[in-house]
Image: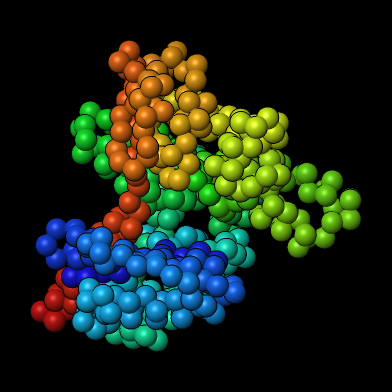
Amino acid sequence: MRILIANLGSTSFKYKLFDMSDGEVLLAEGDVDRIAQHTSEWSFRGGRPEENDSGNEHFASHAEAIDFHLNTLIDKSVISHSGQIEAIGFKAVHGGPINSAVLVDEHVINVMEEFSDIAPSHNPPYIMAMRAFNKILPNTPQVAAFETAFHQTIPKKRQVYAIPYEWTENLGIRRYGFHGASHCYVGNRLKEIDVSLKKVINCHLGGSSSVCAIENTQSVANSFGMTVQTGIPHAVRVGDFDVFSLLKLKAMGLDQDTIWQKLGKESGLFGISGVSSDLRDIEAAAEQGNQRAALAIDVLAESVRHYIGSYLAILNGVDAICFTGGIGQFSSIIREKVLQDMEFAGIHLDRDQNRQSDGTKENRIDHSTSTVQIWTIPTNEELIVARQTMAILSQQQTQGIRQKG
């Protein structure tokens, strides 16, 4: 079964095409950046290096980008026609009360629309893509695998805010947790590597960042809250923030739209450093003596340390700490700052191994004296979504057979 996994951003479209019929084979992958801007950059990677391709086009919408890549899959002979794609899985973000992977229908889309106000950069492009795929491939089932699903095992005492309880019950205002596919992949991968690794703290650090406490491959705590604006400082999003500070901003004369713009698109690492939202640029500026850039690095590391300390208490110790995501895998500086002075908990980083780890493959980077394993593992969110899509389709097929019987 060929399953296409779609990963959407406000101006981007990425996909991976898997053949799940005989193992879990990645057939091709591609992406488009800067959709609806003057020039869009696209790339395609197939099974052989000579098939790889890239270029610049103008895509006015996600629908145009999707149509382009479906045609590219045909042109590159990965598939002979678009009908050979038998299912589409979405790494969807916020489905509110929908707490599992589900077949996409109008009800699912309506719920996503209801939660678009708190996921404005994520839900709208997914909704657009779902509708676009439905027009192009009307008979192909779609599955939405929500990032929140993995975190349904978090105890209620770590979900509920100290707010009027009717807000929790009637409005669904609580801690949800995100990056579920990534945390699920790492938790299961570490268990495959070493069955004794039952207590895991996974640090998914990138443009969007979170830390997750995992016990026996299940999520028991996550640094995100109600929305993806919360928790650790992100590239441009604020992270944890005292909501009563809004009173000060309002007194300054800032309107609500400006405040949300500042907190959602001009804060995080960019807001502190004033240099860039990209940690690579920030690290380079810090090396040149930029104090705000150095502060942004320290703030990010300190926030991750805060959550690791909390999760050491929740898990009653830890067997492994993992770093994944664009920052987690590739920034030896962040990993070193995060794990410094943690020998008291049996966590001892091997600095040489850490600096040699290039982030492109699985690496164990703990010191020989460490009682806690430390890993960098490239995440594979799309594979998890492909598995979830397969499970939903198999479940539907089984139910159909029972009904006919």
Q: Nearer the viewer, residue 284 or 230?
A: 284
Q: Quadrant of the N terminus?
A: bottom left
Q: Is residue 267 left or right of residue 203?
A: right
Residue 200, quarter of the rendered image: top left
Q: Nearer the viewer, residue 56 or 331?
A: 56
Picture coordinates of residue 179, whole percent (x, y): 44, 50
Q: Nearer the viewer, residue 222 or 181?
A: 181
Q: Residue furthest front?
A: 50
Looking at the picture, the colour scheme in use is rainbow
Picture coordinates of residue 301, whole percent (x, y): 55, 31
Q: Quadrant of the C terminus?
A: bottom left
Q: Which residue occupies 30% across, 29% down?
A: 364
Q: Which residue occupies 43% across, 39% down?
A: 330
Q: Nearer the viewer, residue 342 or 70?
A: 70
Picture coordinates of residue 391, whole percent (x, y): 23, 62
**Relative vertical location of residue 147 with respect to residue 106 in this rendering, above or below:** above
Q: Which residue occupies 48% across, 68% down?
A: 41
Residue 53, quarter of the rendered image: bottom left
Q: Is residue 162 visible?
A: no
**Relative vertical location of residue 147 with respect to residue 360 in this rendering, above or below:** below
Q: Which residue occupies 22% across, 62% down?
A: 48
**Relative vertical location of residue 234 with respect to residue 68 in this rendering, above or below:** above
Q: Is residue 85 left or right of residue 215?
A: left
Q: Is residue 286 visible?
A: yes
Residue 370, quarter of the rendered image: top left
